[in-house]
Amino acid sequence: MYSALKAAESILDLVARVFEWACVCILAVMLAINAGNITSRAVLDQPLNWVWPWTMVLFLWWVMLAFYPLYRRRKDVSIYILLKFIGPTWRRVLGVFVQVAVLAAAGLLLYTIPERLVSSRGLIEIVALPREVLIYPLLLSTLPIFLDALVALAAIATGRQEYTPFGMIEAAE
């Protein structure tokens, strides 16, 4: 079980790195096309009308793809003061509860993906992409979050890992 969890964690780290790389590339494209639009307006007095809708599509992808690396790197915020007052057994119970809650939320999103795809009809104006392309980054981020929570649940439940809340920092009192 230990080697399977370790392999799963390595794969999830790799997925987070790939998503980070994709986010950097998307950000570079957004900056480049907007710089081109600004230059076109200033030099040619002609806007590039396609830049705004493409920026919105790319921004959505950028934000959605960033969810998993942020989750994996524990960069979101949580309230952890309770952990100072509970023992290791209750900390493990709390860790299991948190992972089950993440599994439930991510599982619900994954469960509704087919319905979201069916309801996304038509094309995005100016960009001429099918609307369902806006659902794919949600799927791409939710799936590894679900798998990550599953691996963390197994590690916490077996005692291999202690529950560490997201964003936990040590501060002088």
Image (spheres, helix red, strand yellow):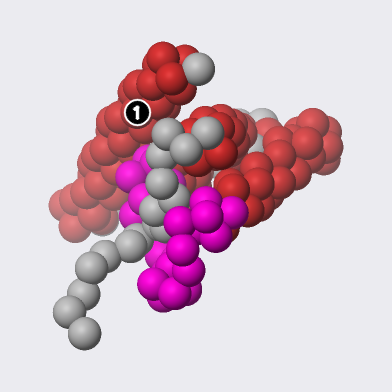
Q: Amino acid at mark 1?
A: Asp
Residue drawn 64% across the image and 38% down it:
135
Classify residue 32 as left or right of residue 113. Answer: left
Pick the residue in front: 142 or 24. Answer: 142
Residue drawn 71% across the image and 39% down it:
107
**Is residue 77 something that shows in the picture?**
yes
**Label 1: how many residues lie within 10 Å, few (<14), some (14-19) or many (20+)?**
some
Magenta segment: does it hold 88? Answer: yes
Part of the protein shown in magenta:
69-93
Classify residue 21 as left or right of residue 71. Answer: left
On the image, the x and y values in percent for residue 65 come to 45, 39
Return the residue at label 1: 13
Classify residue 15 as left or right of residue 92. Answer: left
Check the image and name the residue furthest to the bottom: 173
**Compared to 58, does 83 lie above or below?**
below
Pick the residue in front: 149 or 24. Answer: 149
**Compared to 88, does 153 lie above or below?**
above
